[in-house]
Amino acid sequence: MLELDEIQKRLLREVADLHKVPEGAFNIRSNSQSVGRASTENILIEPREDGQGLTVRIKPGTKNESVHIPVVMTKSGLKELVYNDFYIGEGADVVIVAGCGIDNCGPKDSEHDGIHRFFVEKGARVRYVEKHVGSGTGTGKRILNPGTEVYLEEDSTMEMEMVQIRGVDDTDRTTKAELKQGARLTVRERLMTHENQTAISTYLVRMLGEGASADVVSRSVARDHSYQKFDAKLIGDAPCSGHTECDSIIMDEGRILAVPGLEANNVDAALVHEAAIGKIAGDQIIKLMTLGLSEAEAEEQIINGFLK
């Protein structure tokens, strides 16, 4: 593996919790190049022919293994589009850790657009973690536009943890999923924007088979002059259950738009949407201030607990 500088190492720690070369299968991408890659007996990682992404194949029955595919960018003005395909074999149970960190100290925008497709076979289980962070003192933006497609076969499960807490100027996240009989999708999104940042999250989940279920929950905080849009649509084409929820705190001059979408095409499709947007309750702040915290410290405590 090529040597990384201290900024690149910090970004890897923040987006993938990597303090050293990970055990198991991994591919680390830095400034549009693979700087380290390893496969295992059960997990094969191969580069695409065009060099712009990966194909990851996980053998049926693989248990207790992980795949790390983080991306870091430290060059101002760099823009890339990467395609990664994951084929998870029948009965496998794995963890996939992705994420991108951009440190931009220059005048030009830096952008990473990643398209991930997951083909999850019968009875397989995947936990997917995707974290985004931005940093740097430059005037150029840090832009992340992830696109995710999920195809769940019978009785398979996908758990997605999507986190973006700081530093990303613009993001447009699109997630599409198709669930067959008995398949289950769980999404937990945590998001915070500040200054003039914009974050758009779009989810389109179609439940095709009997007993399919989806639970999509977003918790977010919009500060300063930032803008957020949460657009979640569930489509029930069979006897199924679906739930979406947007729970947001708005501060300063922030703006938040929640767009629910429920489409039932079967009499036994049970679909629910919940949304709540509001400011931090004054009594919560006062209670913490009586314990010795300043108003700003009390706000931070409340926000940190809310986004856990």
Image (cartoon, grey):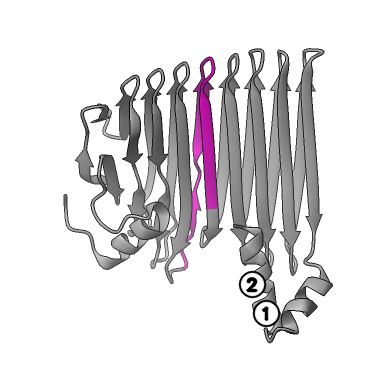
Q: Can you tell which mark lies on residue 300?
A: 2
Residue located 78% across and 36% down the image: 273
Q: Is residue 261 visible?
A: yes
Q: Position of residue 173 (x, y in %)?
A: 56, 42
Q: Label the magenta part by its dominant secondary structure.
A: strand
User: From what the image shows, is residue 274 above or below residue 295?
Assistant: above
**Which residue position is annotated with label 1?**
296
Give the residue type that dot 2 points to. Answer: Glu
Q: Is residue 194 visible?
A: no
Q: Nearer the viewer, residue 95 or 224?
A: 95
Q: Is residue 145 magenta?
A: yes
The image quadrant of residue 116 is top left
Q: Secondary structure at mark 1?
A: helix
Q: Marks 1 and 2: CB-CB under 8 Å?
A: yes
Q: Position of residue 25 (x, y in %)?
A: 26, 38
Magenta-highlighted residues: 139-163
Q: Position of residue 235 (x, y in %)?
A: 71, 22
Q: Is residue 216 left or right of residue 269?
A: left
Q: Nearer the viewer, residue 132 or 58?
A: 58
Residue located 60% across and 46% down the image: 189
